[in-house]
Image (tube, coloured by chain):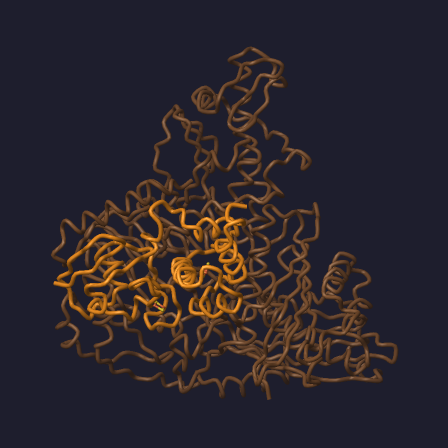
Amino acid sequence: MISVTLNGETLEFDLDPDTPLLWVLRDHLGLTGTKYGCGEGECGACIVHLDDKPVNACITPLSEASGRSVKTIEGLSPDGRHPLQLAWIIEEVPQCGYCQSGQLMTAAALLATHPRPTDAQIETAMSEVICRCGSYNRIRRAILRASNPEAQNG
Amino acid sequence: MADSDAQLRLSRRALLRVAAASGGGLALGILFPAQAETSAPDQPQQDDGPETLAPNAWIRIHRDGGIQLVVARSEMGQGVTTSLAMLLAEELEVGLDQIRVEQAPVDAAYINHLLGEQATGESTSIRDAWLVLREAGAVARQLLITAAAAIWSVPESRCEARRGVIHLLDDQRSLSYAELAATAAKLPLPALPALKPSGTWSLIGTTQRRIDAPDKVLGAARFGLDVRLPEMLYASIARCDLIGGHITNWRENATRAIPGVLNVFAVRYGIAVIAESSWAALRGRETLEITTRPSTNLAADTQRIRNRLRIALKGRAAVAYKKGDVSAALNASPHQIESIYEVPFQAHACMEPMNCTADVRRDHCDLYVPTQSQARARATAQRITGLPADRIAVHTTFLGNGFERRREQDFIVDAVELSKELKRPVQVIWTREDDLRHDFFRPMSLHRLRGGIDAEGRLTAWFHRVAGPSVLARIAPDQITNGVDPFMMAGATDLPYSVAHRRVEYRRADTPVPIGLWPGGGQGHNIFATECFLDELAHIAGKDPLQLRRDHLTDRPRLLNLLNRAAEEADWDNPPAPGRGRGIALMEAFGSLIAAIAEVSIEETKVRVRRVICAVDCGQAVNPEIVRAQIESGIAFGLTSALKGEITLTKGRVDQSTLRDYPLLKANEMPDVTIHLVKSDAEPGGVSGLASPLMAPAVANALFSLTGEPVRSLPIRLG
Ligand code: FES
Ligand code: FES
């Protein structure tokens, strides 16, 4: 049995410990917000938080999450009103939307460590997640908006 | 619209249920969080009783107040869910906050007249819908007004529709659409009512927030791979990696030993591994030992194809356009040059790999699929199952990119065949490697251009030959006339510059590599060649590339105006900062016009695109912010194909299989973007992929100005 705290709930898993977290979420829990894009840690569509740090769920085995805490897009906020989620809507970030869970989780981890990130910090952090729709400049604006309390609801 | 609280509650409930049932294993049949109450694309769920006003295929007004609008184009990021709903809502006189959008089933009513079938692509959605959807909205509005006027016994001219309510003018009385639905449903359809004059629009031309955004920031939007059905199995198919080759044998012992793997068998496109979970299917497929036999024809090799296309640049060819006498004019020109440009095979690389879920039963079939072509999807299922068309339902999910790749049928064949065989719902998952290796690639093409320019810098002659495989020969052979494939020639035949003597030719040179449509169309390869060649001619004549373009656009005022706007915005008259170069490209396509200027620098050995300035005239912009997003999207797609990966083949095998060897543009490579949207009341043009073809030539021209070395092949490599 592998015990993982997922979005605040403690779950027990009787699964092959090598199963990538991505597929535990998607297939076994039906939490399909975390996406499969490459399965090799290259695209970032699958990024979730493992003890508050962004990891590629596609190459993180379940065993690595044992006794730790995992947060997915479904658990990013209790009410869908994380400052980033609000800013994402205001800046019209999502296009096809496929990469956006990975983008949001990466941005959320960035803001957790750097509440007022510089352009360079944003660029470095966000270059881990590919957006084939090219929403990058909107993502940057949305992060700046979310990290600036005065601009948040503007 | 999505109720985010309800979704979150649902997803937590789903989670709790698993926690309760924990002990691991397979938790099948968990309700997808969004399934119950969002705009997750599906068929309209409410039945149309006699109480429902359903005057056409797009509008359902229910007695309980629900207003459903049906969107019959696939949402792949281009914003159709919002912009098509806006066209309906404008004339229906409802706000986007009052409606619920549903994805259309397959039906003749939903045909895209520009594509001749129910399909989404080639930047046609808005152009096709512009009249049709506004008329559909207006008819419904008219019925509601007629119903209200009858109830109140007043002339219709005293009734006014506003935000889902008919108001009686100079009176307190009003009736909501819900209250009027049953009465209006009994009325005969009116003659076509007049459309609202543009001055009275409340939605068209305004920025309305995207309807699909709330679901997409919650992770609740349902894509193809997110479909979860009771009893559903997962499948991965090992394909033959040799183009034209065959799988002759395979060993499956190791595969069958993997927990969760249920079955292994051969299907049309390879060896399928069926499993209880995605992971088991993918892992099982990894362990298959496959023996292949190459095709006897080893021509699927980039070097051999290049040689073949080089040969095709000479000799006979089909004439796509001819004016004057090019040979004579070339000979008479004081300066004449020839250049050859090359565009490689490239992969679409949709973020969501190809996939499809099929549920084939004895008497019906359901497809849950991110497809750009519902009509073809149904036809594919019909062919394989033998079921009549009305027993096949196509449920279109959100698409994690489309890029014309999802017009194809291969992933649908996979799922339908497997579900038919297994008599259970099956989700077929392509890996990234499958997706990159087994694409219908952007065609490779070679271009020979010859041009003459006189002492005053006037173009005197222009010759352009395109050599490459025919894309339409497979997809739409009836569109090929006199040996000319209009897809391959788009942007070349219709060169916007006026030149007295011009000849454009196509030499079809098919290759054994599967090829298909590409966002931005054939302009993607042709505009690269023509706009770069123009700068080479300007260079020879010692002319400013902007001025050369201006001088030859005097009879194209709309395009000339746009070029000037872009130049102004980029401050073209003043030189760029040291170490930077600027390049221009422009184009007219899909009923829209665009001019772009790229500013680049070289960092160490890498091209860095610092800034892209676009001036866009797409006629009436339905939703300006979505137009901007589409231009940004085209810039990213175009820069990726200009600077990043190429698909090469060695002895029948695609060399690239991961995002390491086929890289895509990342955040730190995205330039600053300035978009100048020209106000226009012309009919709307398409904007999907519009900026894409201009990126390669604009960047190439910028580099040429910086280094003095012309760029003639893609992706751009320095030195
Ligand atoms: S799916 Fe994990 S990085 Fe691409
Ligand atoms: S929004 Fe489509 S890939 Fe990022």
The x, y position of residue A99, in whole percent, is: 41, 61
Q: Is residue B569 above or below residue B713?
A: above
* Front in this rendered view, residue B449 or B355: B355
Residue visible at 43% across and 51% down in the picture: A85
* Front in this rendered view, residue B525 or B391: B525
How many marks the image carries: the answer is: 0
* Front in this rendered view, residue B330 or B693: B693
Q: Is residue B716 left or right of residue B199?
A: left
Corner quadrant of residue B430: bottom left
Instruction: Give the residue furthest to the right.
Output: B456
Q: Quadrant of the N terminus of chain A?
A: bottom left
Q: Is residue B240 left or right of residue B454?
A: left
Which corner quadrant of the figure contains ligand 1?
A: bottom left
Corner quadrant of residue B10: top left
Instruction: Note the chain letter of the orange one.
Output: A
Q: Is residue A91 left or right of residue A64?
A: right
Q: Is residue B300 above or below residue A107?
A: below
Instruction: Give the residue furthest to the top.
Output: B153
Residue visible at 30% across and 53% down in the picture: B227
Q: Is residue B127 left or right of residue B405?
A: right
The x, y position of residue B182, in whole percent, is: 43, 21
The x, y position of residue A83, in whole percent, is: 44, 51
Instruction: Note the chain letter of the brown one.
Output: B
The x, y position of residue B563, in whole percent, is: 74, 63
